[in-house]
Image (cartoon, grey):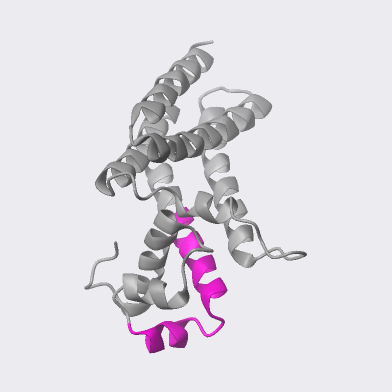
Amino acid sequence: MAKSSAPSRERIVAGAADLISRRGLNATSIRELAKHAKAPLGSTYHYFPEGKGQLATEAVRYAGGAVARILRRELDAGPVAGLRAFLSLWRGIVIESDFRAGCPVLAVSVEEPPAGEMPPALTAAAEAFEDWEQLLAEALRKHGVDGDQARGLAALIVASVEGAIAMCRAKRSMQPLDRVARQLETLIAGVLDG
């Protein structure tokens, strides 16, 4: 959860990302999002006059950006280091929450949008996934992997890790993420050596 010393707006966004990662978007109200962030409801509406949809969009962007910053930093040491950091981040979130939290980007992505609408939070989720994939693909290309293969591996990494997080929560075990981690590291090492 967000630190109480964080500015109100940032604390609300971080708290919303955390609660969405636990319950999903449809299962939370703006009142619950404010309460989880330990922010007054009035402040929440002040910062997010468009309501829950606006807050959810910013929460997804916040989470997507936080992951992207970690990837950018760790991918400087190479694709395997970036993969390990990506896995370590999610491992920490799942374990620290006692299997109650996962990825808010995925949580928004798997919920049914209103008929005929493309909610901004869903668009933000697609952008976050795309950003992560681009970062991974760029790192792979820098280490000699062909462009198409790099893009495919990047999509495989993101999809595998996101799916493993969901499986870990369901099984209340880190075993799915551990298995995926081993397979992805082996695959990437083989591609880089090949």
State yes or no: residue 64 in magenta.
Answer: yes
Q: Where is residue 118 in the image (x, y as percent from the top left)?
A: 70, 63
Q: Position of residue 131 (x, y in %)?
A: 56, 48
Residue 76 seen from this side: no
| Residue 60 falls left or right of residue 78 | right
The residue depicted at 39 percent of the width and 41 percent of the height is 169
37 is higher (above) or lower (below) than 163: below
The residue depicted at 54 percent of the width and 66 percent of the height is 57
| Residue 170 falls left or right of residue 142 | left
The residue depicted at 43 percent of the width and 21 percent of the height is 185
Q: Position of residue 40 (x, y in %)?
A: 33, 84
Which secondary structure is most common in the magenta stretch? helix
Q: Nearer the viewer, residue 140 or 133?
A: 133
> Which portion, as a residue range, is magenta?
40-65
188 is higher (above) or lower (below) than 170: above
Q: Which of 39 and 186 is in front in this view?
A: 39
Considering every residue shown, the one lying at the far right of the view is 116
State yes or no: residue 62 in magenta.
Answer: yes
183 is higher (above) or lower (below) than 20: above
